[in-house]
Amino acid sequence: MAEISYDEFAKVDIRVGRVVKAEPYPEARKPAIKLWIDFGPEIGEKRSSAQITAHYAPDELVGRLVMGVVNFPPRQIGKFMSEVLVLGFHDADDAVVLATPDKEAPIGARLC
């Protein structure tokens, strides 16, 4: 595991957002869901393609809090532009489980 300094870590802007829209993304190479996430007035609404289909359906994601890296450059995923990286962990079967705050947090709050 490579070590990084606190200053390097501080450059990663991780914020809390609320999913406002979610749709299946069957055209993706790997099964994915398209997400529209509100990160509050400072960041605004951003889109993400997330490979989270093993544990989540689009209709159950709307309204959920998620954590995302908001300062990576946008990335083209097929015909969809992904603007943030939604964070998660691989489970024992290598499927992604979302990283979420365990209590309500203000939309746009930065990880500290």
Image: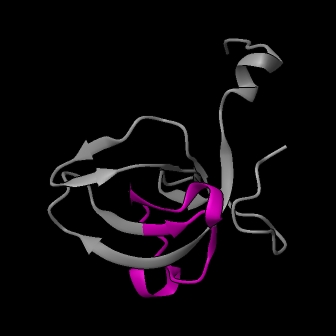
Queried whether the magenta region covers residue 52, the answer comes back as yes
On the question of residue 81 being in view, the answer is yes
Nearer to us in this view, 47 or 49 = 47
Which residue appears at 79% of the width and 13% of the height? 5
Q: Quadrant of residue 69?
A: top right
Please provide percent x and percent y for residue 39.
Answer: 60, 62
Which quarter of the image is occupied by the N terminus?
top right
> In the picture provided, is 103 more to the left or to the right than 11?
right
Tell which residue pokes out farthest to the front in this image.
41
Tell which residue pokes out farthest to the bottom in this image.
59
Please provide percent x and percent y for residue 32.
Answer: 32, 62
Which residue appears at 58% of the width and 55% of the height? 43
Q: Is residue 9 above or below residue 101?
A: above
Which residue appears at 78% of the width and 69% of the height? 106
Q: Is residue 15 above or below residue 57?
A: above
User: Over which residues does the magenta segment extend?
Assistant: 36-65
Nearer to us in this view, 1 or 21 = 21
Please provide percent x and percent y for residue 100.
Answer: 70, 63
Please provide percent x and percent y for residue 18.
Answer: 60, 72
Which scheme is used to colour this image of the protein?
A: one colour
